[in-house]
Amino acid sequence: MAEQAPGTRVPTVIAEDVHIVYRVNGARTGKGSATAALSRIVKRGGEERGVRKVHAVRGVSFVAHRGEAIGLIGSNGSGKSTLLRAIAGLLPPESGKVYTDGQPSLLGVNAALMNDLTGERNIVLGGLAMGMSREQIKERYQEIVDFSGINEKGDFVTLPMRTYSSGMQARLRFSIAAAKDHDVLMIDEALATGDAKFRKRSEERIRELRRQAGTVFLVSHSNKSIRDTCDRVLWLERGELRMDGPTEEVLREYEKFSGK
Amino acid sequence: MSAPPSPDEGLTAAQLAAKYGLAVSGARPSLREYLGRLWGRRHFILAFSQAKLTAQYSQAKLGQLWQVATPLLNAAVYFMIFGVILNASRGMEKEVYIPFLVTGVFVFTFTQSSVMSGVRAISGNLGLVRALHFPRAALPISFALQQLQQLLYSMIVLFLVVIGFGSYPDASWLLIIPALVLQFCFNTGLALVFARAGAKTPDLAQLMPFVMRTWMYASGVMFSIPVFLADKPQWMASVLQWNPAAIYMDLVRFALIDEYGSDYLPQHVWAVAGGWAVLFAVGGFVYFWQAEERYGRG
C-alpha cells in the first residue's frame, strides 16, 4: 500500500459493472423425464442445451475504502451473498471486474468440516483450510475450544461432530471461523447463532474482528445489527444496486420499501 | 452520496485500481507462484486426505478395520469368479495366478478410484470452493493421496496373499516403492485432468465407471496379456501391455511374485513407467492450472 496524504480515502475494494450468472443443469421448465431431456439436447444446438441461467447480480459498481464498515441489505434472493462471494474472488463474475487490496476472506469454514470427525480434528482441519499453520492452530486450539463452550457439558471435543446438537455444531463452526484475523473481512448473516449467552459472546468477537480488519462487509437481515456496525449500506434488489449511501438514509428507504 | 470531492474523481475503475495497487480478485497466479501456494497448503492437503479416509468408515461398527476388510473381500470375489468359476489362469500355476490376480485388482483399483474421485473433486466440493481460498489443485491431489493411503492398507492384504502362495519377501520387494511412486504421479495427473473436465461436465461421473471398466478388462487385470493374445497380431498385445495401467500392474507383480519373471514384462518397462508418470503429472497439472480462476463458477 502506498503512503497517502492524510484526508484522502484509500480504496480497498473496487467493483466495476459486476454481473454474475448461475447456470443450472436440468432445471428447464416442463417435463423432467429422460426423453424430454434427450429431445432438449437434440433440439437445441450450441450453448443453451437444457441449461437454465439465473442472472443473480446485474451490473453492480461501487468503491469501498479503508476503515469502512459496509452493510449489504435486500430481500431474500436479491444477490447479497453472491456479490460477497464475487468480491472475495470465490465466484468468478460473468463480466465486469473486482479489484481488491490483498485477499478478502469470507467468515465461515462450514464446508471444510466433516461431521464424522471429532471436534478436535475439525478444529485442525478447519484451521488448515483457512490457511493457518499448524503452529498457529496449536496456539489457538484451547482458545477455540473455550470460546465454543462445547466442553462445558463434558468432554465433547473428542466425539464426532454428528453427535453434537445443532446449536453446539454452530458454535464450534463459528469459533473455528472466527479464530483467524482477516484484512478485508466479509460476514454473512446468521453467523451469531446458539443460545443468548453464546450470541452475545460471538457478537463481541465479530466486533473485535471488525476492529482488526481494514474493511468489513456485513450481510444481515437485522436492521439493528446493520445500524450498530455499519456506516454505509448497499441495498440490492433483484441483483441490482438500488441504493448506496449512509446507513440511516438507506435504511429509512428500505424500511419504507419493505413496509415496516 | 455526500462524500467530499476527492482527487480520484474521474478515474476509471482500472486506473483507480492501478493507482492504489489493487489486484483483480480471484485472478490466476503464475505457474510458479501457484506451485508455491500449493506447497504452502501441503498440511491442509495431507490433513484433508486423512480426514476423508477416516470419515469413510466412522459410522461402521468395525470402524477402521474395513480399510483392510474391503480389499480382502474384493480379492475373494475376484478369486471366486476368475480363479474358480471361469478359470482364466490359462496354464499359469495357481501359486502364480492368485497373487497375479490380487495384485492386478489392487493396483488397478488405485488408478480407478483416483480417477473417480478426481472427477468429483471440484464438482462435488463446490461448497468448499466457494467458501475458502486455496489453490484448487489441492483438492484432486488430496483425493489422489487418500487413494494412496487406501492402497497401503490393501498392501497388507496383498503381502499376506503373496506370502500365502509361496513368494517370500526378498530384495526385489523394494521395487514396489518406485513402482507405486510412479503410479501415484500418474494417478495424480489423471485426477487433475478429470477434475477440470468434471468441473465443466459433471455428467462424467456417470460415464466414467463404464470407461474405467473397459480399461480394466483391456489391461490384463485377470489374465496375462501375452498369453491371452498369443494367437493375435503382436501389435495388439504391445498396445495393451504398454498402457500405463498394465505397466504399473506388471511392475508390482514382477517385484512381488517370484515366478513372475521379466519375460512377462515388455521391454524398457521402467522407462515407459517413468514416461507416463512425468507426462501425466506435468501435463495434468498445467492443464488444471489453466482453468484455475474459473472453478466455482455458477
Image: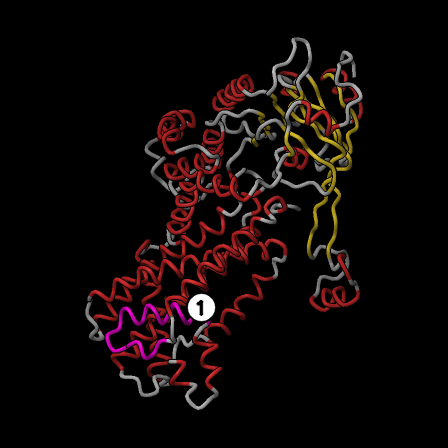
Q: Position of residue B4 (x, y in %)?
A: 76, 11
Span highlighted in magenta in the image: B243-265
Q: Nearer the viewer, residue A6 or A250?
A: A6
- Neighbours of disc 1 within 10 Å: few (<14), some (14-19), many (20+): many
In magenta stretch: residue A117: no
Count of numbered circles on the image:
1
Horizontally, residue B102 falls left or right of residue B37, namely: left
In magenta stretch: residue B251: yes
**Residue sitting at 55 percent across and 24 percent down?**
A183
Q: Chain of mark 1?
A: B
Quadrant in the rendering for residue A238: top right
Quadrant in the rendering for residue B40: top left
Q: Is residue B167 above or below residue A247?
A: below
Please identify the residue farthest to the top as the structure is shown: A6
Horizontally, residue B181 falls left or right of residue A99, namely: left
Q: Position of residue B139 (x, y in %)?
A: 49, 48
Quadrant in the rendering for residue B60: bottom left
**Residue sitting at 72 percent across and 67 percent down?**
A38
Q: Main secondary structure of the magenta part?
A: helix
Q: Is residue B148 above or below residue B218?
A: above
Q: Nearer the viewer, residue A16 or A124?
A: A16
For the residue marked with disc 1, what is the amino acid?
Answer: Pro
Residue bearing mark 1: B244
**Residue sitting at 61 percent across and 61 percent down?**
B203
Q: Position of residue B206 (x, y in %)?
A: 57, 64
